[in-house]
Image: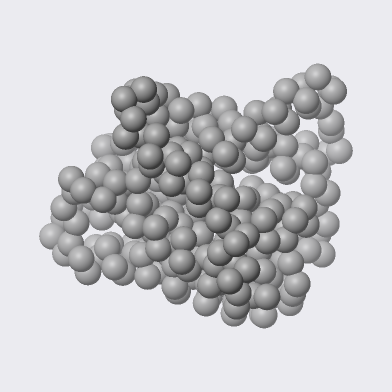
Amino acid sequence: MDGIRLLAPDFALILLGTALRRLPGFPQAFWSGLEQLIYFVLFPALLFTALLRNPIEPGTALPLFGAGLAVMACGIVLSVLLAQLGDHTPLEAVSRAQCGFRFNTYIGLAAATSAMGQAGLATMGLLCGLMVPFANAASVVLLARHAQTRLLPELARNPLILATLTGLACNLLGWHLPAAADAALSRLAQASVPMGLLAVGAALRFKGTRIAPLPAVGVLAVKLLALPVVAWLAAGVSGLSGTPRAVLVLWAGLPSASSAYILAVRLGGDAAGVAWLISVSTLVAMLSLPLLLALLA
């Protein structure tokens, strides 16, 4: 299948990260530091440069934004409802609900590039950049309500939200970076996807957590099954076709983001349960994403 062939290098990096984590030269402290580097430096650089360099055409960006927002809204509502099933605290439930609507941008950018080239990369970069603030804001709002932390400071210092808003502002104002700064950020952005895929693999966890089957299956079904269907319908309503439609559906079917785990740790949520959901969604996506690409061909 072409989808498997196209995505095989990306999933190979994930599996390599899983293998490296088990070697004595790569302790947990190394991976924790790498996750922080990606979250606070590499990934923001990627979002900023993707939004700064790709022209935003209202005729394409607005329908894509509207469809993406509709898909995410459905994901938030369904995930929060299903995550509440079972015996758990409200904070545990909402921390797990993140996994039903947050998306792994590293895998999305890699998959879009492999399947659709530079056009896919530019469109996926734009869509992810537009949706990251909403995904992060929704997660922070859900967790902050139960974690006894201040909402506005959490939003104001979130590096992904800051990078996205800054990139959008510079794009719309027509501002450009000096050549040296642009080159430095480009190198950081180029490192983010392979490093992110390795970190995704290293973060896979299938043991050491207790989570009820019903809410777990519900959240995973929302992320990997329901949202691609919603995205397909939203693309039709929004008049999207070709690469934008394919990118929207592929984005909707991405596995859960590893940044959901980082936020759960910071705000005292069910970090172990979130790690398990991210791991299972990533494993299942190794089969579901090639199938999505085959259906979109």
When the figure is inspected, residue 258 is found, relative to residue 79, above or below; the finding is above
Out of 45 and 29, give the one closest to the viewer. Answer: 29
The residue located at (73%, 31%) in the rendering is 186
Question: 272 above or below 212?
Answer: above
Say left or right for 87 vs 134: left
Which quadrant of the structure image shows residue 62? bottom right
Q: Nearer the viewer, residue 295 or 132?
A: 295
Total numbered labels placed on residues in the image: 0
Percent coordinates x, y for residue 58 in the rendering? 81, 59
Q: Quadrant of the C terminus?
A: bottom right
Name the residue rendered at 21%, 48% in the picture: 207
Q: Is residue 140 left or right of residue 252?
A: left
Which residue is the extreme one toward the top?
180
Left or right? Give the position of 88 relative to 99. Answer: left
Residue 280: give x, y in percent of width and height: 34, 57
Q: Position of residue 77 (x, y in %)?
A: 40, 66
| Above or below, comparing residue 84 to residue 36 in the picture | below
What residue occupies the far left of the structure in this picture? 87
Q: Residue at x 55, y 56 (%)?
A: 8
State the quadrant of the N terminus.
bottom right
Can see residue 285? yes
Which residue shows up at 86% across the image and 38% down it? 174
Name the quadrant containing residue 244.
Answer: bottom right
Instruction: Judge from the rendering whether residue 64 lies leftward or rightward of residue 182; answer left or right.
Output: left
The colour scheme of the drawn protein is one colour
Is residue 32 visible in the rendered image? The answer is no
Residue nearest the viewer, comparing 296 with 221: 296
Q: Residue 134 at x, y = what percent?
A: 53, 51
